[in-house]
Amino acid sequence: MLKIYNTLSRKLEEFRPIKKGKVGMYTCGPTVYDYDHLGHAWCYFNSDVLRRVLEYQGNEVKQVLNITDVGHLTSDGDTGEDKLEKAAKAGGKTAREIADYFTEIYFINRKKMNFLEPAVICRATDYIPEMIELVQTLIDKSYGYEISDGIYFDTSKFPHYGLLSGNTLDKLKEGARVEINPEKKNHTDFALWKFSPAGDSRQMEWEAFGRQGFPGWHIECSAMSMKHLGKTFDIHTGGEDNIFPHHECEIAQSESASGVKFVNYWFHTRFLMVEGEKMSKSKKNFYRLQDLEEKGFLAMDLRYLFLMAHYRSQLNFTWAGIEGAKIARAKLMNFVAGIKETGKVNKGFKNKFLELLNDDLAMPQVMALVWEVIKSDLSDKDKKATLLDFDRVLGLDLAKAEEEEIPEEIKAIAEKRWLAKSAKDFAQADELRQEIEDAGYIMEDGKEGYKLRKI
C-alpha cells in the first residue's frame, strides 16, 4: 500500500483513492509570464513520478494541469500588477503573445524532461464563466463581499482557514505576508475577483458583477479542478511555496462553496537550492533548462539528478552534481544498450522496488536498487527486463538506449588489453587501460567480457 506525506495531516498516510483504481490529480501549473526554471522542473518532476507510481500500481490517473495566463498579481496581498500584463508592457507584446510564447516553451521543456502528458490542460482564460459562477455562489452564501477594488472572501466565516499551513487566524499577523487594506473585513481576506483600476487599460478583463474585472489567482484553480475532477478529489500537487496563501485559499473558497471536503491528499515538493543558496536572478543562479543545455547537459541528465533526491528534501543543485548525473546516466544507458535480448523481470527486485515506492516515494533508495540490479548475479537479459520495468516509474527512456559508437582504434586497444589481462600481464593491461582512459573512454570488466563507454 502506497504511503505518502499529506501536508494537511502532517503525517504519512496510506493512499486510498475515492474510487478504487481511479485517481483524480490536480497539478498547479505555471504562470506563463517568464521562462520556467529548475525549481519549476523539480516540482513538476515529482508530480510526474507520483503519477507514474500510481499508474505502475494499476491505477488510472486523470491528471489536470492548469496554465495561469491571467490574474496572478505581483503581491500576495492582492495588490500590484498582473504578472502577465507587466511582462507584456515590458516586452512590447500583448498579454496573449506573452502567455502563448512561454506556454509553448514550458511544454517543450516538459517533453524534454519526459513528463507524462496531462489528461486535461486548462488555460485560466478559458474558464472565466466557471470562475464568475463560483464567485457568485460564494457571494450568495455570504462568504464573498464587495469593496472598492474587488470581491473578497471573508476568512472569519471559514473556521478551518490556516489548517493546511498551520497559520491559524490568531497566528497570522496583519501585514506579515500581505499588504494592509483598510477596507477588508479581516487582514487575511483574499480577492476572489478584482475590478480593473479606473483609468487603467487592461488587456485581459471581463464584464462581471457590474464592472470590468479579472479573476483572483486562487479562484482559478478551484474552478478548474472542480470542473474536471468534482467537488472532492484525491490529490493536489504543487510546490511548498503554494501552501500559503494559494492552497490555503483554494481550500477555503472551494469547501465554502461546495459544503464538502475539497482534497483528500496534499502533495508538496520542497524548494530547490542552487549551490547552497536560494535561486535568485540577482545572484545570477536563476537557471533554466536551456542554460544547462548550453553547457552540454541534456534534460534527461537533470531527470537523473532529480531521481537521486527525495521530494521532501531540499535538493541542492550543483554543477558537480549534474556532471555526476550525466556520467551515471550514460553508464546506465550504455549498459542497457549493450544487452540485445530481454528476459524476465526478477520478482525479488520488483518486490523491493515496490516496497521502496510505497515508502513515500523513496527515490534515492530506488536508484541505489537500480545499480544493485546491475551488479547482481542475474543474467544480463533478466537485468535488462527488470530495469525496463523500473523505467515505467523512472522515466529515463531506457528502451530507447543505443550503444555509443566506439572508434575502431579504441576497440583494438581494448582487445589487446583484454588479452594481456587474460595472460596475467597486468602491467601491460594497466598501461593499456590508462591509454583508453586518456582517450576519453572507460573499459569495464565483467564475467562475460568487457564493455566500453565514453567518459
Image (spheres, helix red, strand yellow):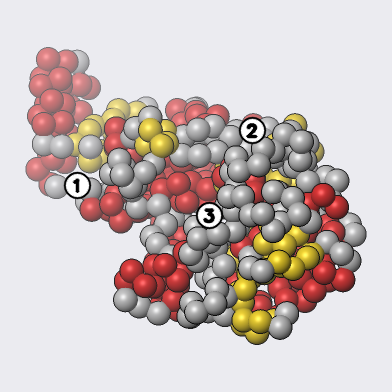
Q: Nearer the viewer, residue 195 or 102?
A: 195
Q: Residues within 10 Å of mark 1 (few under 14, many from 20)?
A: few
- Depth order, front residue of 375/97: 97
Q: Please state which of the two labelled residues, at mark 3 or mark 1, is closer to the viewer.
A: 3
Q: Decide if residue 253 is on the left or right side of residue 66.
A: right
Residue at far front of view: 182
Picture layout, residue 47 above or below residue 428: below
Mark 3 or mark 1, earlier in chain: 3
Q: Quadrant of residue 322?
A: top left
CA gap, disc 3 to disc 1?
55 Å
Tell me what residue is drawn at x 46 percent, y 34 percent: 315
* Residue labelled with disc 2: 356
Q: Nearer the viewer, mark 2 or mark 3?
A: 3
Q: Residue at x 61, y 43 (%)?
A: 175
The image quadrant that residue 122 belongs to is bottom right
Q: Which residue is mark 1?
A: 406
Circle 3 sits in a helix, a strand or a loop, which is it? Answer: loop
Q: Amino acid at mark 2?
A: Leu
At x 22% / y 33%, what residue is drawn? 442
